[in-house]
Amino acid sequence: MRKIILAAAIAGAAFSLTACSEKTEDATSEAADSAAADAAANADAASTAVTDATTDAAAATSEAVDGATTTETTTATTTAQ
């Protein structure tokens, strides 16, 4: 009789561990999926920020070149007169 009760207790414990393990596996999978989604969103945001910064830098460079050209032309005209 003791052997049957002991075997039943061991089987019950094994099923409990299996069920717990499946829940843990599901939770881990969901956490990994969530982390991957967060990483993708952060990569998109970083890409947008880099693109915007590049556009701003190009515009500032263009303005600086235009300003330098205008100053050079004004100086040359003033000197020639």
Image (spheres, rainbow, N blue to C red):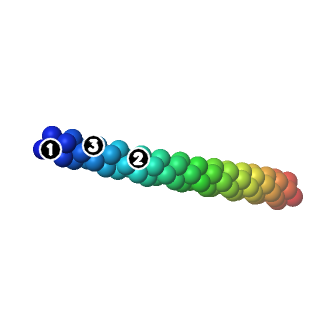
Task: Name the residue nearer the viewer: 75 or 44.
Answer: 44
Assign a secondary structure to mark 1.
Answer: loop
Return the residue at label 2: 22
Nearer the N terminus, badge 1 or badge 2?
1
Return the residue at label 1: 1
Q: How many marks?
A: 3
For residue 11, the mark is 3
Q: CA distance from mark 2 to mark 3?
A: 17 Å
Residue at the image point whose x is 78% and y is 54% from the top:
66
Nearer the N terminus, badge 3 or badge 1?
1
Q: CA distance from mark 3 to mark 1?
A: 15 Å
> Farthest residue toward the front?
1
Image check: 29 left or right of 12?
A: right
Answer yes or no: is residue 61 visible. Answer: no
Q: Is residue 78 above or below residue 50?
A: below
> Where residue 61 appears, x then y in whole percent?
70, 52
Q: Nearer the viewer, mark 2 or mark 3?
A: 3
Assign a secondary structure to mark 2.
Answer: helix
Which image quarter is the N terminus in? top left
Q: Nearer the viewer, mark 1 or mark 2?
A: 1
Task: Name the residue nearer the viewer: 60 or 71.
Answer: 60
> Where residue 2 appears, x then y in whole percent?
12, 44
User: What kind of residue is marked 2?
Assistant: Glu
Assign a secondary structure to mark 3.
Answer: helix
Which image quarter is the C terminus in? bottom right
Image check: 34 left or right of 57?
A: left
